[in-house]
Amino acid sequence: MRGKSIEAAWRGQAECQGCGIRESALFADLLQQDFALVHLPIDEIQFEPGLALYHVGDPGQAVFTIRTGLVKLVRYLADGSQRIVRLLRPGDTAGMESVLGQDYEHTAIALRPALTCRIPREVVTRLAENTPRMHAQLMSRWQRQVQQADAWLTSLSTGSAKARVARLLLLLLDQNASRQCDLFGREDMGAMLGVTTETTSRIVAEFRRDRVLTELGPNRYDCDVDALLRLAGMD
Amino acid sequence: MRGKSIEAAWRGQAECQGCGIRESALFADLLQQDFALVHLPIDEIQFEPGLALYHVGDPGQAVFTIRTGLVKLVRYLADGSQRIVRLLRPGDTAGMESVLGQDYEHTAIALRPALTCRIPREVVTRLAENTPRMHAQLMSRWQRQVQQADAWLTSLSTGSAKARVARLLLLLLDQNASRQCDLFGREDMGAMLGVTTETTSRIVAEFRRDRVLTELGPNRYDCDVDALLRLAGMD
DNA sequence: CGACCCCTTGAGATACCTCAAACTAAGTGG
DNA sequence: CCACTTAGTTTGAGGTATCTCAAGGGGTCG
């Protein structure tokens, strides 16, 4: 939304062992000795909103650990429009298909400034071949993707548009400041819910009129969680 | 649809090494020596249509390899209705979350008579700990689930109802007799597409009137593939 | 200040849903 | 063997949510 520097910025090489979010990241369970197997540089890269980590169809060369920010996974439809199939948050991993030598299945685009670690696929492969701690992490991460995909389908692509928006808002609640959440462009919201930009806009506007949402700043809102839970149930 | 014996039938213990579909199954890459690690019985179980392999929320005790037939993965919504999130075909694996010690995420129900192999989770775990050939299979199977989930969302839950039905028909085309496909109950079809039973029925009836579909038998149809491709594009 | 982007709002069209009834096929029991 | 039940499909009619097309605001940035 902002858009100061429109470039991805290389921030230097990551220092994984001292990483602040390691306990929730792909390398969570690795031991001191395992890091000896990392033979290629892991770069820290910052993506400004709108910039792509990678594109659908590109040969998968690396996985990305999201350290901060928010990333959308997008597929483009026959008519050129986009459908957002998942959101990645801090601790999540993008582009795991690259570990299997496959092309990327989506285009990954930062929705908010996102600090990432780019891990070459060979690093993951080598670790996976040498430590069961890496398998466990990979499996649970893949399972998590499946879970998220299923939840996305059942909660964001099912029911009335109003219920979908309500469920999306609940999903976006800040984990810390639990009544507040940041939204993004109506077009992106629509692409997550399978509805049009206009419908999304109308519903958000209606929520605001009904005091279910209270605007705190540009696209930052205070949410009436009980009301949202009620709306999320059925129309 | 048929419904002769309404019971799941135990068919005996599987002989994995000689299995006819092993090359496409979870044990595809295993070597002779690996089978020594299988220390618990693998049962062959036949499920008649409507019967559940397992239920959502049950503690996951086993994965199932689908040898023949068709299985739906279902989630139930707040209002009691069902949403089908995936279909499993011969060679696919159901209930992989059990390998991670998690409860089942769905209810798995046979849509057509399904012959399955029930593999206790301990067997998979032990194999995974001892042979990289098992990891590779597990990872690619998990990835496949993600792929299917994403495809389900973008092709069966996006666009007009008519386009969704067309895409579903294309998905159901027999791999061998490539103009023909078997359908199932309109309610199930609706639950896959996120539309009502009536809408599904109307569209199938319309396709039949327009000679896009020609009924060959009970719920068996000949498909005009070109017409379906056209319809799948946009409205 | 004007250009641009995005959000909002309106009005009309329409696809889909809801409720209800008729029809079909297959199973059940007298 | 036939009337009866039952479950699923088809069809109709009316209502409504959502889409489409279009215009009008409110920021932000050059």
Image: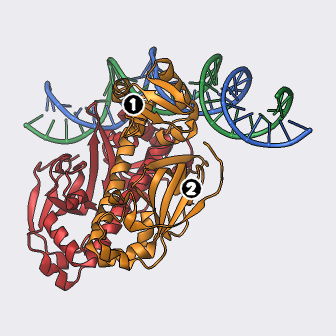
Chain colours: A red, B orange, C blue, D green
Q: Amino acid at mark 2?
A: Phe
Task: Determine the residue positioned at 47% across, 23% down.
Answer: B207
The chain that hosts pointer 2 is B
Q: CA distance from mark 1 to mark 2?
A: 27 Å
Where, by quadrant of the figure, is residue A39 drawn? Answer: bottom left
Identify the mark at residue B188; answer none if there is no mark: none
For marks 1 and 2, the one nearer the N-term is 2
How far across and down, in percent of the image, does residue B196 sit? 55, 35
At 50% from the left and 64% from the top, the residue drawn is B104
Mark 1, Cα crowd under 10 Å, few <14 / some 14-19 / many 20+, is some
Split into 4 quadrants, where in the image is the C terminus of chain B? top left
> Given the current orientation, which residue lies at the most extreme bottom position?
A33
According to the image, label 2 marks what residue? B47
Residue placed under numbered mark 1 in the picture? B179
Q: State left or right for residue B31 relative to residue B1.
A: left
Q: Answer yes or no: are tags 1 and 2 on the same subunit.
A: yes
Q: Residue at x 24, y 63 (%)?
A: A68
Q: The residue tagged with tag 1: helix, strand or loop?
A: loop
Name the amino acid, label 1.
Answer: Arg
